[in-house]
Image (cartoon, helix red, strand yellow):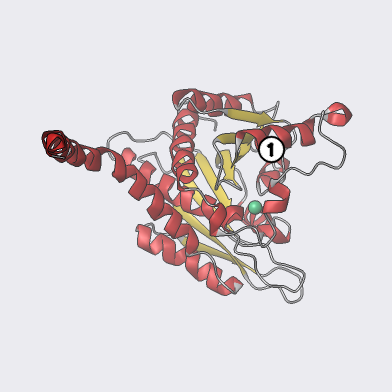
């Protein structure tokens, strides 16, 4: 026992020297991740109105000022929709073209009308974009952007992209150069993005950001629909972004793009389709590391888009 004392003492000494350094380096990131994850949990609400209030309360806590674009869907029993819009201070001229970052914050509901938690789909994206927004404003103080940047938290996506449709119909897209939409970005290590042959500049910006972060990214010619569809229909260069674990991302690619010879067994359903719009979409599925990775890569994509020639 005694013989071990010096070893223990030297171990303790080493720990005393190393631990403060570790506390400085490691937990900062871990704390940030967990804080973001906790923010996602605040979106779990029993009613649509409470979810809307959770969205604006989150932005209030983030110190981001916003305006509300209200709309009444022409459907009986559907609550007023509220798109929440944050115009960032980027240092760009007031007439500069706009990069839009979008995520819907409404949750899907079951057949009885009860809301699912809707954290994977899509509170996580709303929280990620709020942090990307803060990062952009902080960076713009030293490095002004050439584009204006507008973050739009769309409502009623789950009822048929209603918020995005209302926005495009009422505000138009004349000043919008690019749209990055985020949907289902809560777990997994692989970035998925919708790939449009007609928008090669967006694809290049995504790939440059992925290379910068050494992140595996997969482009999908066919990709699950989200609010991006409204901008594609309006001719605005865009991509829709999401995250999945590597294997599931490849399975989803094959299911949507592999045709009849995909190699997937008959009747195979990509796991993400069972994970969303279901009681499985809970905080248990939300991974702090993915939130942090998404925040970093989305910010990098915006920087690469901002370098492109200004389209007027
Ligand atoms: Zn969604």
Toward which corner of the image does residue 170 lie, by quadrant?
bottom right
Crowd tier of the residue under label 1, counting other residues whose Cα lies within 10 Å: few below 14, some 14–19, many 20 or above = few
Above/below status of 154 relative to 226: below
Q: Is mark 1 within 8 Å of ligand 1?
A: no
| Residue at 69% in and 55% down | 161
The location of residue 193, given as percent across then percent down, is: 63, 35
| Residue at 66% in and 49% down | 227
| Residue at 61% in and 45% down | 173
Residue topped by disc 1: 235
Toward which corner of the image does residue 241 lie, by quadrant?
top right
Above/below status of 2 relative to 65: above
Q: Secondary structure beneath disc 1? A: loop
Visible residue check, residue 28: yes
Could you tell me how many numbered marks the image carries?
1
> Which of the pair 16/106 is nearer the observer?
16
Task: Report the quarter where the C terminus lies.
Answer: top right
> Which of the pair 233/20 is nearer the observer?
20
The location of residue 1, given as percent across then percent down, is: 16, 40
Visible residue check, residue 309: no
The location of residue 106, given as percent across then percent down, is: 61, 62
| Residue at 88% in and 30% down | 260
The location of residue 178, given as percent across then percent down, is: 57, 37
């Amino acid at each position: 026992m005694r013989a071990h004392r010096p070893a223990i003492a030297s171990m303790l000494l080493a720990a005393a020297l190393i631990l403060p350094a570790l506390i400085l380096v490691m937990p900062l990131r871990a704390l940030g991740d967990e804080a973001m994850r906790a923010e996602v949990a605040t979106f779990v609400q029993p009613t649509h109105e409470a979810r809307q209030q959770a969205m604006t309360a989150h932005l209030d806590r983030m110190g981001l000022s916003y305006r509300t674009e209200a709309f009444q869907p022409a459907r009986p029993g559907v609550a007023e929709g509220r798109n929440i819009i944050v115009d960032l201070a980027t240092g760009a001229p007031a007439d500069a073209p706009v990069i839009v970052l979008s995520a819907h914050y409404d949750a899907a509901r079951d057949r009885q009308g009860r809301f699912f938690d809707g954290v994977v789909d899509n509170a996580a994206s709303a929280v990620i974009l709020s942090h990307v927004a803060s990062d952009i404003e902080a960076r713009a103080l030293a490095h002004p952007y050439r584009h204006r940047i507008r973050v739009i938290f769309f409502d009623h996506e789950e009822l048929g992209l209603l918020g995005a449709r209302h926005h495009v119909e009422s505000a138009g897209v004349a000043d919008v150069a690019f749209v990055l939409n985020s949907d289902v970005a809560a777990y997994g290590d692989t970035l998925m993005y919708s790939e449009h042959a007609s928008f090669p500049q967006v694809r290049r910006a995504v790939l440059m950001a992925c290379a910068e972060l050494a992140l595996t990214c997969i482009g999908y010619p066919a990709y699950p629909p989200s609010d991006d569809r409204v901008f594609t229909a309006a001719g605005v260069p865009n991509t829709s972004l999401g995250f999945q674990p590597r294997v599931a991302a490849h399975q989803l690619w094959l299911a949507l793009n592999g045709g009849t010879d995909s190699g997937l067994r008959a009747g195979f359903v990509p796991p993400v389709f069972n994970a969303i719009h279901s009681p499985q979409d809970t905080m248990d599925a939300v991974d702090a590391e993915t939130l942090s990775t998404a925040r970093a890569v989305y910010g990098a994509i915006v920087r690469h888009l901002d370098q492109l020639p200004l389209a007027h």
